Amino acid sequence: QVYKVLKQEAEEALSCGQAIVKFNLAEGHERYDNSASFHEAGYDAFITGCVFAYMCDAVGRRPDEFNGHLMMFRGLYNFNLLGDDELLTKGTYLHIKGLKGRGVQDLQDSLQVVLKDVAKKHQNCEQLPTDYEIKWVDDDSAFAIFSEKARELVDMVCAETEVTGANGLNFTLGEHWFAASNPDADLPPRKRPRLS
């Protein structure tokens, strides 16, 4: 259905004189243009490619910008087979440990308590961030990803709770957690093994 909707939108745009993404089918596969041969390898590949090209066009990106990239649902990284992996979300990462048996709401409530406590102690702290993203690492830890504007507050949370923790949680700056979890960090970048 997604392909049909995108194709219909493209045909409407073309009738209005707008430039659209066009596809050329390989000889012998012309029937894919007007059929629904689901789960036939060639057809599935064709539909996937069409949807990808339509979506790239919709967000103003060229398909070759994604060469070698694998996107993982709920992942922290875009895996780049041609270079260094990239974090999906830019910002200030706060690693939170001690979440086993807790749900998302408990995590958010506990985090808000900690943020408020730290902000009260430091009057020069800006307004509390309410917009942050939670990315789970495993059943006991997650990242809260804040905008760069919240960096000072995140630093203070880590400094305040480093020894004792808070609400049963332990907090670490994201870059410290990434460095500690990367045993090859001291190797020159081109010498790091690509696979473990």
Image (spheres, helix red, strand yellow):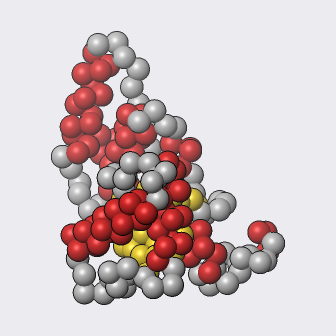
User: Does residue 150 appear left or right of residue 5 in this picture?
Assistant: right
Examine the rendered structure and indicate whether residue 119 appears above or below residue 50.
below
Residue drawn at point x = 29 percent, y = 72 percent: 110
Viewer-closest of 46 and 185: 185
Viewer-closest of 80 and 31: 80
Q: In the rendering, at what x and y percent does residue 121 appear? A: 43, 63
Viewer-closest of 82 and 106: 106
Examine the rendered structure and indicate whether residue 189 appears above or below residue 53.
below
Viewer-closest of 62 and 25: 62
Residue drawn at point x = 27 percent, y = 25 percent: 11
Q: Is residue 18 visible?
A: yes
Q: In the rendering, at what x and y percent does residue 105 appear? A: 21, 69
Residue drawn at point x = 71 percent, y = 80 percent: 184
In this figure, what is the number of numbered marks?
0
Instruction: State which quadrant residue 15 falls in.
Output: top left
Q: In the rendering, at what x and y percent does residue 54 appear? A: 37, 38
User: Does residue 11 appear left or right of residue 176 in this picture?
Assistant: left
Q: In the rendering, at what x and y percent does residue 170 appear? A: 43, 81
Examine the rendered structure and indicate whether residue 174 appears above or below residue 195.
above
Which residue extends farthest left?
A: 1
Q: Which quarter of the figure is the C terminus placed in?
A: bottom right
User: Does residue 63 appear left or right of residue 13 in this picture?
Assistant: right
Residue drawn at point x = 59 percent, y = 81 percent: 181
Q: Is residue 42 visible?
A: no
Instruction: State which quadrant residue 134 falls in.
Output: bottom left
